[in-house]
Image (spheres, rainbow, N blue to C red):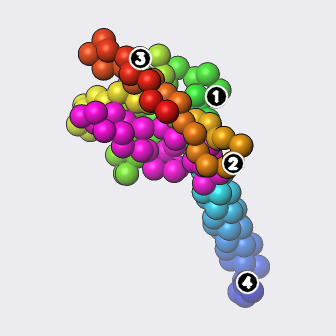
Amino acid sequence: ITLEGLPKDVMDMNSEVSNVMQEQMEREHKEERADQISKTVQWYMVNSGKLDPFDKIANNDIESAYKAKKPSLLFAHQNLKAEINFGNKEVTFLRTGAIKRVLRKDGKNKAGSSLFNYRLFTNNIMSTRT
């Protein structure tokens, strides 16, 4: 990128261009990390007994907060603001007030294919799935 003009304008624009490039690099790094995390850990919402995965960026943010032992996290999923509470394993969508149970699946077997163990609690009945 070549900038031409008055020195002050070039300096101001150089700063803006640098900021935009830095933000883009950070976005790309976050997307790469999210891709890697989603290969071993996936967070889901429980919707009428079905598991709906969070998108990769939300999944990455949730997993990072979970590993940092934060009690909750504000994040965006499909352009909706939400708050996940790790203590009660629920996500609340702030605009609608909808509350869903959440589930974390993790693991890899030696062959490289995903092997997930999790427990799903519904109506005081526990089922274990592999």
At x 26%, y 16%, the residue is: 123
Which of marks 1 and 2 precedes in the sequence?
1
Q: Nearer the viewer, mark 2 or mark 1?
A: 2
- Measured in 3D between alpha carbons, the distance from the residue under mark 2 to the one under mark 1, in whole angstroms, is 25 Å
Which of marks 3 and 4 precedes in the sequence?
4
**Place of residue 85 in the rendered image (x, y in percent of width and height, measured from the top left):** 44, 23
- Measured in 3D between alpha carbons, the distance from the residue under mark 3 to the one under mark 1, in whole angstroms, is 16 Å
| Amino acid type at mark 3 | Asn
Q: Are marks 4 and 3 in contact (CB under 8 Å)?
A: no
Taking the image as drawn, is residue 121 in sight? yes
* Quadrant including the N terminus: bottom right
Q: Are marks 2 and 1 in contact (CB under 8 Å)?
A: no
| Residue at mark 1 | 67
At x 71%, y 43%, the residue is: 110
Task: Please give the range of residues in magenta.
Answer: 35-59
| Residue at mark 4 | 1
| Amino acid type at mark 4 | Ile
Secondary structure at badge 3 equals: loop
**Place of residue 59 in the rendered image (x, y in percent of width and height, measured from the top left):** 52, 43
Q: Which mark is residue 79?
A: none
| Residue at mark 3 | 88
| Residue at mark 2 | 111
Secondary structure at badge 2 equals: loop
Q: Are marks 2 and 3 in contact (CB under 8 Å)?
A: no
At x 30%, y 11%, the residue is: 124
Q: Nearer the viewer, mark 4 or mark 3?
A: 3
